[in-house]
C-alpha cells in the first residue's frame, strides 16, 4: 500500500532512471539494423508516453531537498545517438548546477550497439557523471549509504539482455566479505527479479545469470538493498529467500499518465541497515510523496 507521506527527511539519496531522450534523425547513412528498429519503435510507441515538461521540476526538487547524491540508473538515450546524448548531458549539467553530486550508470540503450561501446560514447558524453572509479566500484555517501555500482549492460545484436562481466562477480564477492559500516545499496541498470507484483519482464529484456547474482547476495550476511531501473515501473519487493534483501525498481522519470508527469525515488537510511523508501510523483504543480510497503503484496 502507498501511504501518503510528507517530504522525505534529510539525509537522503534521490534515484531517477530511464530518461530516454530521443532525436529525429532518420538518415539511412546513420540508422541501420537495430538502430533503425529502435528509432521506429521510439517514434511509433515510446515517444507518446514521454513528457519532458517535468524536467525543471527535477531541478527544483534538487534545489529544495539538497540530497546527498542523485543516482541516475541509466537509459539516458533511446538509440545512443550523439544528439540524444547531448540532450541528456544538458539535463545532467542543469541538475549538477544545484550542487548535487550525481552518479550516472549507463543503461542498455546507452550502449545500444557494439560500435557505441568501442567508441566509448558513454564516457565521452556522460564522463563527468560516471562513477570516478568506473563500474564496478564503490562510493561512500556520507550519512546515507555505501553504494556498490554494479555492471549489467552490454550491447546485443538484437535483444535487450543484460550481462555481468567478470569484474562484476568479483565486486559481489568482496561485498559479501565487507564488515560493518554504512547501509549497503547496490545500484544497477537491470533488476534481478524477472517478475514482481508490479512488472513481468520479457525474456529478451532480462539479465543473464540473475539467479547466480541472487545466490551470492542471498549468502551475504549483511542487509542489502538492490536498486535498478530498466523496467520503467516502480516496485518494492522483499526478497523471498533473504528477508533483509530489498529489491527496488525506479520508474521511468518522464513517463506520463494523467496524474503523473515525473517520478523519482528517495531513500533515507534506517537503523536496521535498510532504507525507508519514498516514491515521489510530480503532478504538474507539486511533488507528492508516498511511502510504499515491501510487504503489502
Ligand atoms: Fe533499459
Image: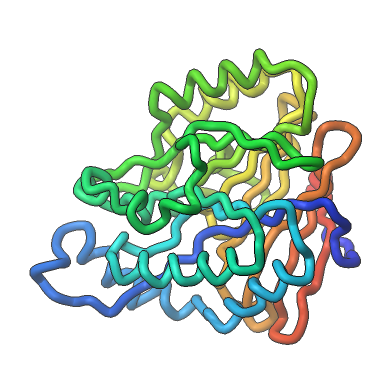
Taking the spot 83% from the left edge, 43% from the top edge, the residue there is 269
Q: How many circles with numbers are drawn on the protein? A: 0
Q: Where is residue 218 in the image (x, y as percent from the top left)?
A: 67, 21
Asked whether, in this view, residue 262 is left or right of residue 135, the answer is right
Q: In this view, does 72 lie to the left or right of 182?
A: left
Q: Find residue 224 and report its horizontal and vertical position in percent.
A: 72, 31
Quadrant of the rendered image containing residue 215: top right
Q: Residue 175: horizontal and vertical position, in percent?
A: 63, 21
Colour treatment of the image: rainbow
Q: Which of 212 and 175 is in front in this view?
A: 175
- Name, please, the residue furthest toward the left: 29
The quadrant where residue 98 appears: bottom right
222 or 135: nearer the eye? 135
Identity of the residue drawn at 57% across and 84% down: 53
Give x and y (percent) for residue 36: 20, 66
Using the rendered view, name the quadrant where residue 95 is placed: bottom right
Task: Tell me if 157 is positioned left or right of 228 in this view.
Answer: left
Q: Which residue lies furthest to the top in this view?
A: 177
At x 22% / y 48%, what residue is drawn?
A: 119
Please tell me whether residue 115 is drawn above or below residue 64 in the rendered image.
Answer: above
Which residue is at a point 69% across and 81% down the rendered structure image? 259
- Quarter holding the N terminus? bottom right
Tell me if residue 214 comes above or below residue 103 in the rendering.
above
Amino acid at each position: 500500500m502507498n501511504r501518503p507521506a510528507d517530504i522525505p527527511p534529510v539525509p537522503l539519496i534521490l534515484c531517477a532512471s530511464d530518461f530516454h531522450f530521443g532525436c529525429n534523425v532518420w538518415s539511412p547513412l546513420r540508422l541501420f539494423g537495430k538502430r533503425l528498429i529502435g528509432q521506429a519503435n521510439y517514434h511509433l510507441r515510446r515517444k507518446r508516453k514521454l513528457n519532458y515538461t517535468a524536467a525543471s521540476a527535477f531541478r527544483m526538487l534538487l534545489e529544495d531537498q539538497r540530497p546527498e547524491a542523485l543516482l541516475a540508473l541509466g537509459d539516458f538515450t533511446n538509440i545512443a545517438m550523439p544528439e540524444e546524448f547531448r540532450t541528456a548531458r544538458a539535463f545532467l549539467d542543469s541538475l549538477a548546477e544545484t550542487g548535487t553530486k550525481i552518479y550516472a550508470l549507463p543503461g542498455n540503450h546507452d550502449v545500444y550497439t557494439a560500435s557505441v561501446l568501442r567508441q566509448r560514447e558513454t564516457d565521452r558524453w556522460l564522463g563527468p557523471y560516471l562513477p570516478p572509479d568506473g563500474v564496478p566500484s564503490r562510493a561512500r555517501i556520507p550519512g546515507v549509504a555505501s553504494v556498490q555500482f554494479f555492471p549489467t549492460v552490454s550491447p546485443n545484436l538484437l535483444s535487450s539482455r543484460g550481462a555481468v562481466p567478470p569484474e562484476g562477480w568479483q565486486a559481489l564477492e568482496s561485498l559479501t566479505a565487507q564488515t560493518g559500516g554504512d547501509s549497503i545499496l547496490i545500484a544497477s541498470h537491470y533488476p534481478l527479479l524477472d517478475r514482481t507484483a508490479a512488472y513481468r519482464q520479457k525474456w529478451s529484456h532480462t539479465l543473464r545469470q540473475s539467479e547466480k547474482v541472487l545466490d551470492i547476495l542471498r549468502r551475504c550476511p549483511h542487509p542489502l538493498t538492490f536498486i535498478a531501473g530498466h523496467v520503467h515501473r516502480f516496485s518494492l519487493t522483499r526478497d523471498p529467500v533473504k528477508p533483509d534483501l530489498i529489491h527496488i525498481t525506479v520508474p521511468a522519470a518522464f513517463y506520463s499518465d494523467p496524474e503523473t508527469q515525473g517520478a523519482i525515488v528517495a531513500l533515507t537510511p534506517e537503523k536496521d541497515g535498510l532504507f525507508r523508501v519514498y516514491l515521489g510523483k510530480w503532478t504538474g504543480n507539486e511533488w507528492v510523496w508516498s511511502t510504499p510497503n515491501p510487504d503489502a503484496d
